[in-house]
Image (cartoon, rainbow, N blue to C red):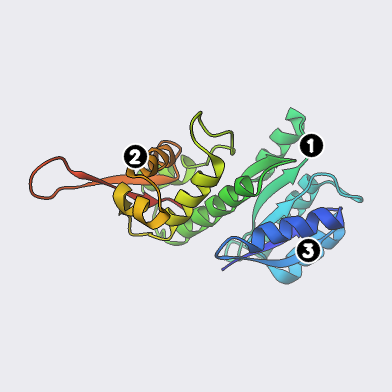
């Protein structure tokens, strides 16, 4: 379970983000803070795995909060657990984005964003933690996979694809972590095989699915899709 500290000065926004987090399997809200001081205190006491940080806070900005959290982690020593950070903010200026990245943020979501966009980034953060935790000594391909799999910010679907169908296909895909074919996806989601394959191929192109070929007897090999993250 990935424990998340939600930090936003707006009580209603923080509550909404908390609902978004709780709706993702494997995530729970460890706490909520509405100021920088409260965020630092909660991070120290709760030891969350992930910080959802707004930039605009009443006493200090979110980047200062992240830098302070990092400084405390350094003082605690290499063996202490480190929290990852994801900014969710209305701040759009490039200087702030650069500062967030250099402070150690995994990603930066600009408000307003969709629930799907946050879900994608949460799953990416959990995937990075899992991969790093499994490593004893990293090979270059391990590092490339970790640093090279930042998901693209959620954007409009290509022409001809519908958001509700994409959500349906993604739910079916994630319900089959061992992988499934387009035909199996179509049956599980009550879709046509052609439609299911279009969405699965889109997920493969955007890094949300991996494709493997399964060879049988005669004919072309079967394409099987497995969720990523």
Q: Earlier in the sequence, mark 2 or mark 1?
A: 1
In the image, is 229 to the left or to the right of 8?
left
Q: Earlier in the sequence, mark 2 or mark 3?
A: 3
Under circle 3, the secondary element is strand
Q: Position of residue 158 (x, y in %)?
A: 50, 30
Q: How far apart are marks 2 and 3 (CA)?
A: 44 Å
In the image, is 221 to the left or to the right of 57?
left
Q: Mark 2 points at which residue?
A: 194
Q: Where is residue 7 in the image (x, y as percent from the top left)?
A: 78, 56
Rate crowding at label 1 as few (under 14), some (14 to 19) or many (20 or more) other CA atoms within 10 Å. some
Between 185 and 105, the one lying in front of the other is 185
Please name the residue shown 34% across and 39% down the image.
194
Q: How far apart are marks 1 and 3 (CA)?
A: 20 Å
Q: Mark 1 points at which residue?
A: 91
Rate crowding at label 3 as few (under 14), some (14 to 19) or many (20 or more) other CA atoms within 10 Å. many
Under circle 1, the secondary element is loop
Q: Mark 3 points at which residue?
A: 32
Which mark lies nearer to you, 2 or 1?
A: 2
Please name the residue shown 75% across and 67% down the image.
31
Location of residue 92 by image quarter: top right
């Amino acid at each position: 379970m990935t424990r998340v500290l939600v930090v936003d000065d707006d009580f209603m926004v923080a509550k909404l983000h908390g609902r978004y987090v709780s709706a993702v399997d494997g995530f729970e809200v460890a706490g909520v803070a509405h100021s920088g001081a409260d965020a630092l205190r909660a991070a120290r006491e709760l030891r969350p795995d992930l910080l959802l940080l707004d930039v605009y806070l009443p006493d200090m900005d979110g980047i200062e909060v992240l830098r302070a959290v990092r400084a405390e982690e350094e003082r605690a020593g290499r063996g202490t657990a480190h929290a990852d950070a994801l900014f969710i903010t209305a701040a759009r200026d490039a200087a702030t984005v650069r500062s967030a990245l250099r402070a150690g943020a995994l990603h930066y979501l600009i408000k307003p964003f969709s629930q799907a966009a946050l879900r994608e980034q949460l799953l990416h953060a959990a995937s990075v933690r899992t991969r790093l935790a499994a490593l004893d000594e990293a090979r270059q391909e391990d590092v490339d996979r970790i640093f090279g799999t930042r998901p693209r910010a959620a954007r409009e679907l290509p022409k001809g694809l519908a958001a509700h169908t994409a959500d349906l296909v993604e739910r079916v895909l994630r319900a089959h972590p061992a992988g499934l074919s387009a035909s199996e996806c179509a049956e599980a989601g009550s879709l046509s095989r052609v439609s299911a394959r279009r969405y699965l191929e889109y997920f493969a192109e955007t890094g949300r699915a991996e494709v493997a070929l399964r060879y049988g007897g005669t004919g072309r090999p079967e394409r099987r899709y497995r969720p990523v993250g």
